[in-house]
Image (cartoon, grey):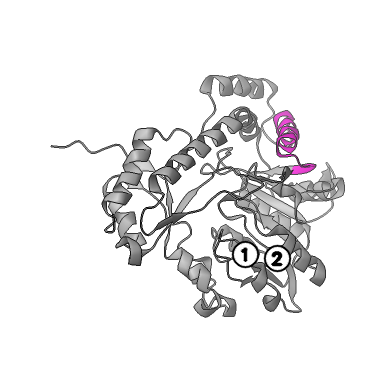
């Protein structure tokens, strides 16, 4: 009987060395400060701002709470133009703030919000644009910000995928009014759970920090109706250790990406994204598109073939947010308004990628793709 090969998942979290984490835990146990803007929290924010090349950063217990708070911080109301091609947290954050998401189609090159479709979706109720740097690929920043300025709209970037990404030497998080990061376990940089808001001046950071801590200014002063979204000391300490190895992790992801590209180049019906000139990528994902007409196999058939071989790729993002029950009845969610997004969501498949993925496992993945490709 043939032994079943070990499972390969779409991602696997990078953890800091346990012996180093124990040193930090000992300090926490000694000082008895485990939350409420403790010393590791403060050190982590400073270290993150320096690493990312941003002026002000506020860390959160998770990325969804950071999104919710970013909308509150800018007093966003009414309607917000956003993408259907993302994780549901993007639109859920709007819904929880009683804001109507207005879906706009994506562009076909890197699957980010298409600026050419934004102006037609603006109404008197529109207050902001919330694009997503999909797979860490920068949105068309200049075009989006030009439209926002023209119509007096705020821009909040969902940068959950874009940790460490730079464009022409400048952090991608320095664009827009605010940028929101996720440090979830599946991300390039993780603090188990976690997130952050990047802002551009001290006054906005202070406002955000009030909002994430019940609105407290001091022991007896509440300046607004905040929530509890603080990152605890254990997460912050864990994050400080992660910063020591993040460059090595991204470099390993780049090598894996190059191996996939070399192996799959020229495979009929299989296409993948190239690097964008001037962009420092983080190689967070490796999405492919599966074209049935030229490969002889559908995306879902390939997905199931990989699964039968104990390889768990993911259909990021499928279905579209606009297809889920809370959103599908919105006028902007109609399929005729989102042709590119519907096309991409029916073909996209993200292959396994994480720093410890080895050559044997990479070979398993692409060989199965080629084996079931009827055009090879």
Q: Quadrant of the N terminus?
A: top left
Residue at 56 percent of width and 61 percent of height: 109
**80 in relation to 236, above or below:** below
Q: In the shown orientation, is residue 76 left or right of residue 191?
A: right
Q: Of circles 2 and 1, which is in front?
A: 1
User: Dividing the picture into quarters, in which one does residue 67 lie?
Assistant: bottom right
Query: Which of 102/28 is in front?
Result: 102
Q: How many marks can you see?
A: 2
In the rendered structure, find residue 266 and report the number of the disc placed on it. none
Cβ atoms at labels 2 and 1 below 8 Å apart: yes
Q: Which residue is mark 1?
A: 113
Query: Which of 193/82 is in front?
Result: 82
Examine the residues drawn in magenta and state their main secondary structure: helix
Q: Quadrant of the C terminus?
A: bottom left
User: Dividing the picture into quarters, in which one does residue 352 lie?
Assistant: top left
- Label 1, secondary structure: give it: loop
Locate residue 364, reporting x and y percent: 32, 41
**375 in relation to 185, above or below:** below
Membership of 70 in magenta stretch: no
Q: In the shown orientation, is residue 169 left or right of residue 26?
A: right
Q: Earlier in the sequence, mark 2 or mark 1?
A: 1
Residue at 42 percent of width and 65 percent of height: 346
- Label 2, secondary structure: give it: strand
Query: Which of 104/209 is in front?
Result: 104
Locate residue 270, reporting x and y percent: 39, 56
Residue at 51 percent of width and 44 percent of height: 186
Q: In the shown orientation, is residue 96 left or right of residue 273?
A: right
Q: Which residue is mark 2?
A: 129
Locate residue 48, reporting x and y percent: 71, 36
Which contiguous range is marked in magenta?
A: 37-57
Locate residue 175, reporting x and y percent: 75, 53
């Amino acid at each position: 009987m043939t032994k079943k090969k070990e499972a390969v998942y779409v991602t696997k979290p990078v953890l800091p060395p346990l012996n180093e984490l124990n040193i930090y835990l000992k300090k926490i146990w000694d000082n008895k400060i485990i939350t409420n803007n403790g010393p590791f929290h403060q050190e982590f924010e400073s270290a993150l701002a320096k690493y990312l090349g941003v002026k002000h950063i506020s860390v959160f217990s998770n990325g969804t709470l950071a999104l919710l708070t970013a909308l509150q911080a800018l007093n966003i109301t009414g309607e917000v133009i956003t993408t259907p091609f993302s994780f549901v947290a993007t639109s859920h954050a709007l819904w929880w703030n009683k804001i109507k998401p207005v879906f706009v189609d994506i562009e076909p090159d890197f699957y980010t919000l298409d600026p050419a479709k934004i102006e037609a979706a603006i109404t008197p109720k529109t207050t902001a644009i919330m694009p997503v740097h999909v797979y860490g690929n920068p949105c068309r920043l200049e075009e989006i910000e030009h439209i926002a300025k023209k119509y007096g709209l705020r821009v909040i970037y969902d940068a959950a995928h874009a940790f460490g990404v730079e464009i022409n030497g400048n952090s991608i998080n320095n664009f827009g009014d605010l940028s929101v990061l996720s440090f979830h376990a599946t991300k390039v940089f993780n603090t188990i759970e976690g997130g952050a808001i990047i802002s551009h001046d001290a006054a906005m950071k202070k406002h955000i920090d009030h909002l994430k801590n019940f609105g407290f200014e001091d022991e007896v002063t509440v300046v607004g109706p905040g929530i509890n979204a603080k990152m605890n000391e254990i997460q912050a300490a864990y994050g400080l250790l992660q910063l020591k190895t993040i460059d090595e992790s991204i470099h390993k992801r780049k090598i894996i990406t190059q191996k996939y590209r070399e192996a799959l180049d020229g495979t009929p019906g299989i296409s993948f994204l190239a690097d964008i000139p001037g962009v420092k990528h983080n190689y967070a994902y490796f999405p492919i598109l599966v074209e049935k007409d030229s490969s002889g196999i559908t995306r879902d058939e390939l997905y199931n073939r990989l699964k039968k071989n104990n390889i768990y790729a993911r259909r990021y993002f499928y279905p579209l947010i606009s297809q889920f029950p809370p959103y599908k009845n919105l006028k902007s969610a109609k399929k005729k308004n989102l042709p590119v997004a519907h096309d991409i969501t029916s073909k996209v498949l993200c292959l396994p990628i994480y720093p410890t993925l080895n050559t044997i496992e990479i070979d398993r993945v692409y060989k199965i793709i080629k084996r079931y490709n009827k055009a090879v």
